Amino acid sequence: MKSLWDEPAARAMVKAYAAEGVGEDIALRTYSARLLGADPRLVLHGGGNTSVKTSAGDLYGEEIAVLCVKGSGWDLAAIEPAGHPAVRLAPLLRLRALEALSDEDMVNAQRQSLLQSLSPTPSVETLLHAFIGEKFIDHTHAVALLVLANQPDAGALIARLYGRRVACVAYVMPGFDLAKRAAAIFDAQVGLEGLVLLNHGLFTFGATARQSYERMIDLVSVAEDYLAARPPLAPAPRRSTGAPAAEVLPLLRGVLSQGAQASWPSRWVLDLRADHEVMRLVDDARLAEWAARGVATPDHVIRTKRYPLVLGEPGGDLRGWRDKARAALAAYIADYQDYFSRNAARAGGGKTQLDPLPRVVAISGVGLIGIGRNAAEAAIAADVAQSWATTLLAAERAGRFTPLGEADTFDMEYWSLEQAKLGKSARGRLEGCVAVITGGGGAIGAATAQAFAREGAQIAILDNSEGAAVTAAQAIDARALALVCDVTDPASVEDAFAAVCRRFGGVDVVVSNAGAATTGMIADLPAADLRASFELNFFAHQAVAQAAVRIMRAQNMGGVLLFNASKQALNPGADFGAYGAAKAALLALVRQYALEHGADGIRVNAVNPDRIRSGLLTKAMIASRAAARGVDEATYMAGNLLGEEVTAEDVAQAFVFAALMRRTTGAVITVDGGNVAAMVR
Ligand code: ZN
């Protein structure tokens, strides 16, 4: 591991922040905190914390000594000066004289001493930062250190590797007791560069931001060099599972959903990791035994639970595998409930059980799967699981992975201060749903994708234009999936749906939207044109529906199929025969799917939009039609009962509502501002 400290970059940051009135100490604190946060080998997702002791002016113009320490809710990778709120140092230091201090009193004392009353709550490790008398302090959960700190003989090993550069602190939960214990060890030994918290992580400190940061890099590098020299583990036997992940994940998603009680979340997004290292872990015969050992640092328990659900290799008999997975999940849940009862009683009660479902699944031959209420949460679980795999394998090479036991892990999992890190963000109405939108790069498709994303759904955009798909996905966020798909080619459709399953674990909502109009009087129309219109406006919808239904039935969680029909299906227009006939057939298809898959819980509805500015109705077409009717463009576009132009956003809203209507199937929803001739009858 190399120091990424770049003096010109650091000075530039000092200068830039000075223009905003931010002092040099905070600017450099921000600079090096970001360096730490950017490396997943050091910290992951809100883990780790940093501080600087400096001074700040109060209302009376007096300078007061403050500790600026990471506030909860901030991620080191993207921290800003406001992410290190200033706490008066003197009242924090006074606390050290106390014999005991409850977590609630500690948090209260920290908040009382904030310079800005609205600042985020300072880190749970604030007192440790306060009591250690060094200007800059950095704390990480570096993987290489966790490999050492989770060995049975960690103390001796660390002493051998580092000599008197670091001292070890036996595990105790973060808070007042840890702060006092760590500070006592720090005070007793002159010249320390860092403290290793056994089973937990590493603190370094220094007179400058650079010194503290570079000590961190240096101490972690010593561990890395030691580990690199350990003999490798014997390779795991190569497994070649007969079942691709795209088929296994929807089954797993269904198992998780059906294994949940009513009060637990039941719709999950999955995130598969299957790199070389992960496969080394999941293909090892010791997987189940390894998995039961525990988390690499207690902080991770809130992301991954104490251990993953372990499932065997799916072979050719996927139904048989699913039955075994159901039984394994039931056992996992029962085990978790026992763990809770046992430890809640030990802790004196007063705890509320979290849902007992796993957040990571390890499947031989497939990989490690993060589970979350949305893709972001699933990715965090998967990142932490991957880091756990790295730590465990390296620890087994170096000796034996021996993490913290059940009781201490439980105390962390059910510590109110730790749960607060998870935040209480509002859940969208379609949270946990995966929505696929074909023609997602077009006007209606892109607006629909955004409308579903606003409701919390994960989005896959399928379009025959890569550029359009990517642009529409980027307009949502980095997690939206853009896939090139020719919906008239069933193999291309199958590939796209398989990619969606590999990425998110399955499919819940499909908006089959891609289409285009062929014009010309029907009697003069070349047969090839009519057939081409049916390929795109009818058979493509069938290919999409077939692919979707196969996945929805594998999941056994119901589903929603929505089709963009057209006003033409009910109210034909001259020259639009090829389009209207195919769309009329599409309406029949909608009813057929509604009829045959109601019992699977799959709702099937059509939306009939009309006169929307899009690829089907271009600016030139609007101009010529308005001219033909002797009206201006705005009047032409508002030519409906409501007298208002209908937009792609209106259609998008109709698709969202259709996805939410729990007891409606086989319906046609018209979005045309009102047109008597096009009303469903
Ligand atoms: Zn920590």
Image: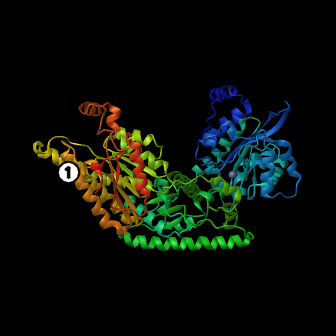
Horizontal arrangement in the rendering, residue 382 relative to residue 188 (left or right) = left
The residue sitting at 69% across, 38% down in the picture is 82
Q: Residue at x 60, y 49 (%)?
A: 45
Nearer to the camera, 392 or 514: 514
Name the residue nearer the viewer: 645 or 316.
645
Report helix, strand or loop for mark 1.
Answer: helix
Locate residue 204: give its quadrant: top right
- Amino acid at pointer 1: Ala
Residue 449 sits above or below residue 320 on the image: above
Residue 451 is situated, as x and y percent measured from the top left of the image, at 45, 47
Q: Is residue 423 above or below residue 66?
A: below
Residue placed under numbered mark 1 in the picture: 581
The N terminus lies in quadrant? top right
State which quarter of the image contains the C terminus: bottom left
Left or right for 187, reference 50: right
Name the foreground residue: 103 vs 363: 103
